Amino acid sequence: MSDLIYKRIFEVRILHGYYLDHWYWSADNTPKIFQEYGPEEQAFVLENKYDVRQHFFVEPSESTQKRMKGLKIKWQLTPFGLLVGQEVVRSSGGSYLPRSSISADTRLTFKIRIRDGQLYNRTNHALKPTLPAYYYFSNIQDGNLAKEYPSLSVLPSPFNPERSWEMGEFARDNGVIRMARRSTQDINDLATISFQNWANTADRKALPKTFFYRFDAKYDVNQPVIKAQFTLLSPDGTIVKTIGQEYGAGMHPSGQRLDFQSKDKEAGQIQPLPIADGPYRLDVRINNLLFEQREILLRSDLTENSSVFGLLEIACRATDGDFSLLEADGSLRRRIQNGKASCPVFEIRVPARQTYWRYNFRDKHTMPAQAGPFDGMEYDGETKQLITTNPRRLTLTKERLTLTATSAVHLPTPDRPDLTYERKQYFSELYLSTLKLD
């Protein structure tokens, strides 16, 4: 037993911005996100402020557990995510070869489950998409959906003015990544951002074989759905199944339940043929017009309304560039990270929810009815609240609010109607008291 050597094959870190962002600030007094920290800052926050096991649980699928047992592969959860290692032998050249050979088509699948019931409230996650799909993260490189190491997320989908975008969703616009500042169909409501390869709606493609398709928010009493058609196609374009439905006048359906467990029964068949697990394309036509085309992944091991956040699928091969686990000779791949040789360390970057912040004032603070406008803030005299003019990330950290302006503001008082204060001085010590989600 003493001769057994286990080495790390790969690591996956689940990095949630709500818990990791804003612990450090830049020189211009701007809070930084985790990806903007230096290596020492990242290490300190991960080791002292974070334990992902409180929020997520990662476990291999049943078939993967059997496969790993045969390949002498072990796994464990860490405060950062998932660590996977394998029994190896050391070559004369110093590299490590798996003791049990891994075939090029071997894939390890893990389910990421939610432990924290409030997680979606803290996550930049569309709550009412048309497809109730789970996230799908993989190291498999697809030329059409190229990823940027170490993030396992694909780029956001191109902006489509025909669909509704929820506040906080990311979209591509001629190579620029934008974020919706409110629920909208207007590109002007999306602001350009510095995108950090976060998990986004384009990553949500894993579905059970029966699910409820929600009609887009634009279909209401003034523009009802009269007819809907859903066509499932294989990757080569072959039609697998078509589901059509017509709705009577005044019905105003919210959506349609779809069943893709089996194909339509053909003449001479006793039972219809089952639909295999795998990738497909779903074409949706509403009122005879093509509404959307979505790449999906049907899985028989998924169910509706479960605690699953997403699937993680890792391919054990040497053909995925920076995301490969093995070298061409079959040895474990090693990367130089922070000056040290390491197995590939992948990241699932979960962004914090974006929302408008509302500040309530403590009793010792007062605000004149005509206060403002301030840089990045507006004062609502009726509710006595300061409201951010743009969405901001939710964060676990307690942030000081400093209001600044380039000129003085007239703040009359009963005894000194001509008294004037500098805004920066007057409001420099306000702190977040109450937060309301919009």
Image: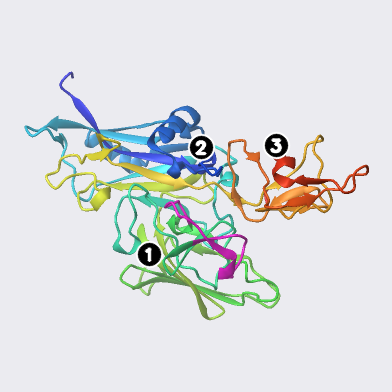
Q: Nearer the viewer, mark 3 or mark 1?
A: 3
- Secondary structure, mark 3, is loop
Mark 1 or mark 2, which is nearer the start of the sequence? Answer: 2
432 in magenta: no
Instruction: Say which amino acid is labelled 2.
Output: Tyr
List x then y, in percent, for residue 238: 34, 73
Residue 280: numbered disc: 1
Which secondary structure type mostly characterizes the magenta part of the structure? Answer: loop
Instruction: Say which amino acid is labelled 1.
Output: Tyr
Residue appearing at x 78%, y 53% in the figure: 380
Q: CA distance from mark 3 to mark 1?
A: 55 Å
Determine whether label 2 and label 3 are within 8 Å by CB.
Answer: no
List x then y, in percent, for residue 434: 72, 40
List x then y, in percent, for residue 133: 48, 56
Q: Which residue is mark 3?
A: 429
Q: Residues within 10 Å of mark 1 (few under 14, many from 20)?
A: many
> With respect to residue 194, does 17 lie above or below?
above
Q: Residues within 10 Å of mark 2 (few under 14, many from 20)?
A: many
Mark 1 or mark 3, which is nearer the start of the sequence? Answer: 1
Residue ranking furthest to the top:
2
Instruction: Say which amino acid is labelled 3.
Output: Glu
Q: In front: 256, or 111?
A: 111
List x then y, in percent, for residue 296: 41, 61
Residue range of the region highlighted in magenta in the rendering: 178-200
Q: CA distance from mark 2 to mark 1?
A: 43 Å
Residue ranking furthest to the bottom:
288
Instruction: Give the quarter of the image for residue 208.
Output: bottom left
Q: In front: 6, or 168?
A: 168
